[in-house]
Amino acid sequence: MEFTFDLNTIWFILIGVLLAGYAILDGFDLGVGALHLFVKGDTNRRIMLNSIGPVWDGNEVWLVTGGGALFAAFPDVYATVFSGFYNAMMLLLAVLIFRATAIEFRSKQASTKWRESWDRAFSISSIFIAFLMGVALGNIVTGVPVGADKEFAGTFLGLLNPYAIMVGITTVALFMMHGSIYAVMKTEGELQSKLRSWVNNTIIFFTISYVGTTMTTLVYYPHMAEPFKQNPALYVVALLNMLAVANIPREIHHGRDFRAFLSSCASIVALLALFAIGLFPNLVLSNPNPEYSLTIYNAASSQKTLETMLIIAIIGIPFVLAYTISIYWVFRGKVKLNKMSY
């Protein structure tokens, strides 16, 4: 792999940063949702829901921004993925809408059955969203049938291969770990103690899933390890990922919840970096015809478009970051229920 720092590479990195931002921010939302049904009692479930209440919709903006950046920088990839994966995308969109509806409707009535129904909807949809995103990543690793015309030639069921399902489960486990740590930061008392005891269980779940997925990747998809063989210095990313995960139980044990959350964030960034390094310069790997793969060069917009969009991104991203930071600053601290709460 020859790394050339040009506009195409810059946009590859920038889209990766946007997707990493989404994984970090909406990742803990989905993780909290995945754990939601394990929490007992209406008050405790409301606390869990309100821990993400002020930020969940803003977090999803990062996904929209990432999709917009993909459209602007690599339109052929956008066209192939969004048309070829149409059924999967519509399913993901439907579940995202269903999850948002569950959050908004859950506390509109005091009926126990009403609230339990929306609790199940919220939790199941959160797990399903994380799983679908993992399946998408898994298919990018395995490759999908793309023809010389850059059109997807596969089927929806073909995307549900064993490796993609394994990556989907690993993604759910990662977000459950991330969400449990966030929930510990936002709660107190008996609920916090219960959640704190769950963190190690989610770490074990993630570690087992991650090790299994990594071994499968190395055995069946060795192209993902090729850049690391060519440049052994890149192994530092894998080392940083292991150290980040290993540091989480240490910080939780010492009651340094925010540091544990930062370690979880670092783990997500490292995992996506490993994925990006193994994929580069491909964006959509064609299988069984690698010569038809969509790369950062044959699927990119013109250099003038990339340059103009980069200027817009440099101006716009600081505003997005400022907005995100301000929201988290305003709603910092432990969750307190009031009449305005979900």
Image (tube, grey):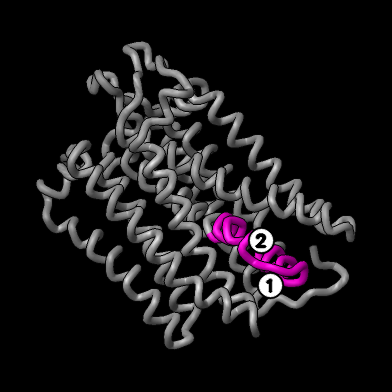
* Residue of label 1: 331
Element carrying mark 1: loop
Quarter of the image holding residue 77? top left
| Residue under label 2 | 55
Residue 161 position within the rendered picture, expressed as x and y whole percent measured from the top left: 37, 31
Residue 148 location in percent, x, y? 32, 12
Part of the protein shown in magenta: 28-52
Number of residues whose C-alpha sits closer than 10 Å to that of mark 1, classed few (under 14), some (14–19) or many (20 or more) = some
Task: Give amino acid for label 1.
Answer: Phe
Residue in the picture at 23% in, 23% down: 290
For marks 2 and 1, give the CA distance.
9 Å
Looking at the image, which residue is at 37% across and 81% down?
250
Q: Are marks 2 and 1 in contact (CB under 8 Å)?
A: yes
**Drawn side of residue 219 relative to residue 130, left or right:** left
Q: Residues within 10 Å of mark 2 (few under 14, many from 20)?
A: some
* Location of the N terminus (image quadrant): top left
